[in-house]
Structures are given as structure tokens and as C-alpha cells.
Image (cartoon, rainbow, N blue to C red):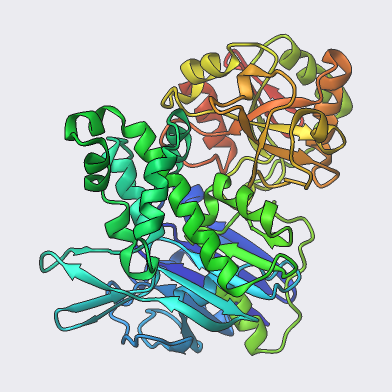
Amino acid sequence: MRLLGLRLDDHDSSFCLYDSGTVSYIKTERKYQKKHHAYNNSWEWAYDLEKFFGLTPQDIDEIAIVADPLRYDIPQFLDFQSKPYKGLVGAKCPVTHVEHHLAHALSAGMYPSTRYQFVIDGVGELFQNKDRVNGTVWSVFKDYKLVDRNSPEFEKTTDSTIRIRNSFGVEYENLARHLDIKAEHPDDLAGKLMSLQSFGKVDYTFLDYLNSRLTDFKDQLSISVHPENWYDHKQSESVGNLTKLDFAATIHRFMEEQILTLIRKHATPDDSILLTGGCAQNICWNTTIKKEFPHTLVVPHSADDGLSFGALEFLLRKNNLDLMSNKGFPYWQADEAPDSEPSQDTINTVAQMLADGKIVGWYQGHGEVGPRALGNRSILMNPMISNAKDIINKRVKNRENYRPFGATVLEDHASTYFDLDFKNPHMLYVGSVNTKVPAITHIDGTCRYQSLGDENLSYRKLIEAFYKITGVPLLLNTSLNRGGKPIAGSKRDALGVLYDTDMDVLVYGNEILTKEK
């Protein structure tokens, strides 16, 4: 049986195909090398189904989609779980439209079920009735059945635009704009703010003031986080603008506390919970939640690129089929993979290059699901070079200099370098750095790191070889891409990084490639 989960919307389209027990996934931005690529029509998917998977619509038995009802002219209901959809051009089988937040809740099907599923993002479904527009900004499911939700009414500012209210994701983006953070796509603002807010200090007097006035964040979040409150607190708009970083740090903490309030309302620390939606990419919030709720699960595809997983899971359950295995996860991108693996000689050679300070592109196997480089699509460097962050930023990444780089540490040595007492295989939590490693340490003394076990043997062997040479069991690790481009999904993409930047070497499978070669 062939089933297809399909994410159609204005950003981050993806396919998730089930074919007789095997799951294949593609985030289309990797194929098109266009950040947040999405279809703006309901027919192009059929051509790409054949291009990516060698299948036609006639080969698919059933489809589930997650799509914007306004863009794709889907009949709207304020609360629904699923409904038939007839508008997917080219489909030859039954198609079901799955509600956005339900798809998020179902998207972790490759892991054991959780008791509660908390979905927190910018906005899921939008529902318009004449001049009235509502949208779902967060949802709570218990055993995948809805138990709580916030679907506030939004302000329609023009015929084509609305002001979204009381959304954690949107207000965080608005805070980034208030700090004059720039991004080519609005979905990239939050990640940049997460780094920048660390340069500020939490104003606990202001935080107490906000908490004392808040009675229900369902209705009052947008009012609470408005910059005017900060200006009033500082008794001067000029002083308020000069202390924006402190305002950002305080609002960051305030939102974290409100999300914790929501979780505490429904779950206990003994409960297993899934935290998903775009806000689950906030590693600072994730870490605080995980420490209080130790059975928290966050998956690397918690943002909208994971919705096709939820759509597929819906179909698996509907058809009483075995659920997904997590074998090989998260290296599930159906992108181009080398036809060779690095030999031990290649690994030893590359480890010495890294020890010597070279910047190495590392392209192995299939790509990772989600936005984090986890050792198959990585740019690597020796973290003990004190200014390695500045070197790699200037020569390759060209990012804002306030943004840190992550690291990968051998799991057996993680506690030597970081303070977390739980595994962090997908870089979804942040730990304080115990041992001095300036190149990967953020201004607040933390690092977003990956703890590596045996799930990626070639990458593990590389770090082990580096450890043998240097005595250091970790590497600086950032994604294999050029500034503003998606992570590489082919040898051609990876060579583009090599030739368009000052990266020293690209390792593609067992090939060691330099510009000269």
C-alpha cells in the first residue's frame, strides 16, 4: 500500500511517502535550494512526486494534506480533525485535509506515543467568515484528542492582511522586528532572536509587573508583551529603546513562564508529553521544560516541515497499519546520497585536517530531517581554536556575529563538557559549558550541542579519530550550506558551498575534494 502525507502551504512544503512499510521524506527546499520553498498551487506536487520518488498519482492509494484553507480554497470549519478534499489537482485517490495542529500532534509517530501533545506555533488553521478571522495559535491534545485550544479572533487590517493576536510564535517574531532583526523569511526571525536575547539581562521587577497584571494569556499575551509596557517601566521611550536587549531577555523569559503555566495546567512531571509546533525549535524553552517535565519529547521536525509526517501518521492510523519505525531516523531525507562511505584512512586524514585548523564540509548518507546538521550535512572545525567561530563565520557562513555555532560531542564525554543529565541527540536542548571551549560557547555560557552515540557511525569514527589526535572528543558543527541557502541536498549543492566560500575541503562519501581537484 502506498500512502502520501503532503504539506502544501505558503512555506516549507514537504512529502512523506509510505510504501509497503518504508517511509521516505523530502523537504522541497532541499531539492530546489530555495529557503522555505512552498508550492503556490495545487497541481505541481504531482510532477514532483514523479521527479522525487518515480511515482505518479495513479500509484498512490490515499493522500492526506495539511494546507492553508484560504490559499487552497478549502471549506473552513472552526474546529475539525479531518475532512475530504476534492481540490488536489491530479489526485486519483481519496484525499483528506488534516487539521494543522492535529498533524503536529501526530508527527512524532516514529517514537512511542505520549500522553499529552502540546502544539505551540505562530498560527495553524485560519478561519474566515465574512470580515471575521480566527486562527488557532496553540492546542493541547490528550492521547491525540483535543482538550484545550486558543483560537482568538484576529484584527483584519486590510482586505488581504490580518494582525495575529495572542500567539507565542508571532509575538516572538514581532519582538525580533522590534529589535530590528532582519531575515529574508519571517520564520527565520525567531532563531536569530533566540541568540540575540542572551546579550540582555532579565529585569525581574518588570517580569513581576507583567505577571501581576496577567490573568489569562489566552486573551492578554499581545497586550502584555507590547513595547509600550517597557517604555512605561523605564519612564522614557528613549531609555526603553536603549535597553531593548533587556526587554527582549525579559519577554523571552515571560513567554517561557506562560508556556510552562499551560503545560502545568494539564500535565504532571510524571506524564509523557510531546512538545511540538514552531515554538519547539526554541532550545532555551525546551531545556527549561525538559528539566521540569523529564519525559518531554521534542522531535527535530517540530516546525511546519514536519506536518507531512503527521499527515502520514493520520493515514497509517486510519488504515490500521503498523506505525513508523524510527530505524535510521533522523537521516530520512530522500536526497542524493554518496555511493561510498569514508574509509578509516579517509577518516584519519580528515581528522588530521581538522586538528590542523581546516574547515571541512562533511556530506555522508542521506540528509537529516529538520533544520539541524547532525553529522551528515555538516561543516566542521576544531573547537579548540579560540577564534574558530569568527574564522568560520568570515570565511564560510557570513552570519550575524552574535549568533553562536553548535557542537557535537561523543555521548560518553557529554557530561565533561555540558551540564545536562539527559541525552541530546538532535540538538534540541542547550547546555551550560563546563569546560572552557570559547569557539562554541555563547555569551550566556551555553552551547547548542549534539550528543552522539552509535546512530551515525562514520561521524562517530571521525570524532573518535580527532579525539585520538587532540584529546578533545567534540567538534564545532554547523550546517552545510551557504548563507541564506538551505542545507545541501546533492553533491552539486555541496560543491557550491566549497567553490562559493573559503571552505578548505569537502568530504563526499569517501572522496576528499578541494578546489584544486
Q: Which image quadrant for residue 108?
A: bottom right
Q: Quadrant of the C terminus?
A: top right
Residue at x-position 73% and y-position 56%? 329
Residue 292 visible within the image: yes
Judge whether 496 appears above or below 457 on screen: above
Q: Position of residue 147 (x, y in %)?
A: 53, 83
Judge whether 73 appears above or below 233 on screen: below
Q: Position of residue 110 (x, y in %)?
A: 72, 67
Q: How many discs mark residues in the rendered view?
A: 0
Q: Quadrant of the N terminus?
A: bottom right
Q: Going by the image, does 409 lie left or right of 120?
A: right
Q: Which image quadrant for residue 327?
A: bottom right
Residue sitting farthest toward the top = 356
Closer-to-camera residue (174/469):
174
Residue at x-position 80% and y-position 27%? 463
Q: Position of residue 186 (x, y in %)?
A: 33, 48
Q: Going by the image, does 396 lie left or right of 19?
A: left
Residue 502 visible within the image: no
Judge whether 185 appears above or below 257 on screen: above
Q: Going by the image, does 442 lie left or right of 272?
A: left
Judge whether 354 appears above or below 15 on screen: above
Closer-to-camera residue (146/207):
207
Residue at x-position 50% and y-position 21%? 396
Q: Going by the image, does 91 lie left or right of 41?
A: right
Residue at x-position 56% and y-position 72%? 265
Closer-to-camera residue (124/358):
124
